[in-house]
Image (cartoon, rainbow, N blue to C red):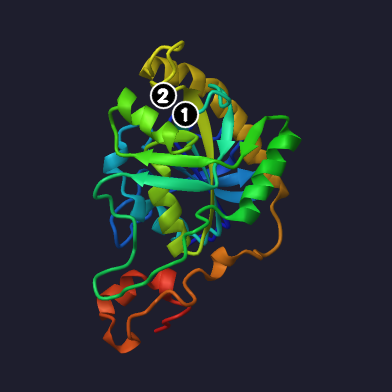
Amino acid sequence: MEQVKIGIIGGSGLYDMAELTDRGEVGVETPFGPPSDKLVLGRLAGKEVAFLARHGRGHRILPSELNFRANIYAMKMLGVERILSASAVGSLKETLAPLDILLPEQFIDRTRGRISTFFGNGIAAHVAFADPVCPDLLTQVHRAAGKAGVKAVRGGTYVCMEGPAFSTKAESHLYRSWGADVIGMTNLQEAKLAREAEICYVTLALITDYDCWHESHESVTVDMIVGNLRQNSRNAQSIIVQAVQDMSGTRACGCADALKNAIITEKSLIPAETKKNLSYIIGKYLPG
């Protein structure tokens, strides 16, 4: 399988990258089923990248229906080491307005029953997740935003809710009381699985609205989101292109060795099928 070092996951409004050249599509079958869509391989800013539309082209898949494991495992199978993820979010802070971009450093999980680990079925592992976003990649993307002339705020907390309905006012005010900054429906599971797969991960949170807490602004609607997404998607693509252009060298962060001391199951007791299914993730620690 073709090896690509950089992966891009596009969320609502970002179903393709116009700047991607020499493109081709590849269907990837993983032990967890198919990813959201075929991956588009091509060149961006002179580098080979893999692009995946998170919700499928045409936006066919709800957040709760996403096969997060297949999406991240497909990236791993292609050799991806860094993932740039973009997604639409609502703002929980007056200072973060629609059309702003946040690069969050933390997540709060408000989802229910979503599978967010590759492990189980006879193998247990516990990765460190205190800092869920790769700090090195975050620095690179923040720097790239400045070079691209796009304002992007570094830091803050992303609340990941279940959906697909938007928040009630009571929920929105609760998340604000926690000090959270934005709310979305997708990125927490991606971040967890990317860490288990030893892939660096960062989120570009594209703010489309003030959720429903802001009394002087109308409650969030799909029409509002789509309109703001068009502009924000252009800005996100500018940042991504610049970040890809600037990427070079081997990784020096801890993401590359996140599983080094995480697997606690006795090797001789791991089922052969489980070991085979996770070969792209655990192969360097449990070869053969």
Dot 2: few (<14), some (14–19), or many (≥20) neighbours within 10 Å? many
Say if 124 sits above or below 98 in the image.
below
Tell me the SS state at disc 1: loop
* Structural distance between the alpha carbons of marks 1 and 2: 7 Å
Q: Residue at x 41, y 12 (%)?
A: 218
Q: Is 185 left or right of 259, judged from the image as shown?
A: left
Q: Residue at x 67, y 65 (%)?
A: 250
Say if 283 sits above or below 177 in the image.
below
Circle 1 sits on which residue?
92
- Residue 238 position by quadrant: top right
The spot of residue 256 in percent (x, y) is 56, 67
Q: Is 93 left or right of 250, judged from the image as shown?
A: left
- Observer able to see residue 45: no
Q: Amino acid at mark 2?
A: Asp
Q: Earlier in the sequence, mark 1 or mark 2?
A: 1
- Residue 136 position by quadrant: bottom right
Tell me the SS state at disc 2: loop
The spot of residue 34 in percent (x, y) is 31, 52
